[in-house]
Amino acid sequence: MRGFLHMMFAILAGVAAGWISAVSLIENYGFEAVAGQPQWHERRNASDHPAAPYAFGYFINQGQVPPPLTSRHFVRSTDDDGAQLRSDCIYQVAGKMPPARRWSMAILLGEGTVSTLGAGETVFEPDGSVRVELSSQPVPGNRLTLPGSGAPLLSLTIHDPAESDAPLSLPGVAKVRC
Amino acid sequence: MGRFYWLLLFLASAIATHAAYVLYYPGYNFDNKVEAVLGGNSTNKMLLLEPAQVSRLFPAYSVSDIVALCRYDLTHGPVAISAKLPRGYWTFSIFTVKGRQVYSLTDAQAGENTFTVDLSQSPDLIAKVKGALDDGGESEAIGEAGWRVETPETKGLAVIWVPVADPIFRSTTLQAVRDSRCAQNR
């Protein structure tokens, strides 16, 4: 009887450890801070990357199709000062996008996408840079809607970048006001 | 010796659970979630997605983009996918139900805006086992603008993505993508 209990305990503890480690790695493994812009994290999902199965799991557990391998996918949850993005603040994403055939940005919350903005619907500055306001309220110019509450994530996907593996220079996110 | 046995049992349970959760569970979960978004009876058909469906399924695309999707099921044989797309940037991707991308084609790689892909399941067990561990996809060209693709899984998604360069071109682009087909090979 004692041996049976030991066996059950070892199996249950193993199942718990395996499950916790899988969930934890799916959430975190494969996110790499971008050189020089540590607020941006790149999700590595190339098939030959050791984190690939976890990266696939990260997206499909949320019922989402992973970004195609011809793209590079970045996310951030903080502004340039390192503070968590908040729904009751207004932020400005400003800078030049890396050379690529297309890019798209999104505000994500939990398992859903709150708003998106693609290069084709963006008004660019005369020097080719972009300025996008993140706000829950209407503002003039390019805007990505923040949710009414919760801790949003900002994602940026660069499709067919000129540099498929080198570090990319991405726009910053500055807090305008709260 | 006794403690070593329990430790071994603990490690074996942990590894099996970890592998099952990472490699197999997401696939079953994903198929159900996709069906919930697209509705039942959505297999082996090319569906032009509504913006809300694009937003729900594709974190990397803008809702103003045009996305056509085929939820393929190779249980009853190969599936043929054909498309005639507008000039400009587009991508065609095939994912397994576990989220692995097994095939990718862009306008630049295709060289033409019309293509056909014959999609079938890898015939041998080794390819299926390999598919659980890496991308596992195989493809070969057939004819001028056709490809034969083998995937290690029976189910998955084929996705055509056409970003709209300017909103005024949206309706003409939409019309072109609407003619794309996905059907079981007879």
Image (cartoon, helix red, strand yellow):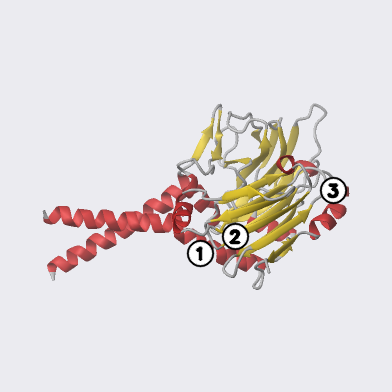
Looking at the picture, how far across and down is residue A42, in whole percent? 55, 38
Q: Are marks 3 and 1 on the same chain?
A: yes
Mark drawn on residue A102: none
Name the residue tied to disc 3.
B167
Disc 2/disc 3 C-alpha distance (Å): 36 Å
Residue for point 50% across, 64% down: B28
> On the picture, is A121 further left or further right than A24?
right
Q: Which quadrant would residue B121 be assigned to in this image? A: bottom right
In this rendering, do the residues under marks 1 and 2 share a single chain?
A: yes
Q: How many marks?
A: 3
Pinpoint the chain carrying mark 1: B
**Relative to A44, B182 lies left or right:** right
- Residue A122 falls left or right of residue A62: right
Q: Separation of disc 3 and disc 1 at Cα?
A: 37 Å
Q: Amino acid at mark 2?
A: Ser
Which SS class for mark 1? helix
- Report the Cα–Cα distance between label 1 and label 2: 20 Å
Q: Position of residue A120 (x, y in %)?
A: 79, 43
Taking the spot 80% from the left edge, 34% from the top edge, the residue there is: A124
Residue B144: percent from left, percent from top = 74, 47
Secondary structure of the residue carrying numbered label 2 = strand
Residue that numbered label 2 is attached to: B120
Q: Are marks 1 and 2 in contact (CB under 8 Å)?
A: no
Residue under label 1: B28
Say whether disc 1 or disc 2 marks the residue closer to the N-terminus: 1
Mark 3 or 1, nearer chain start: 1
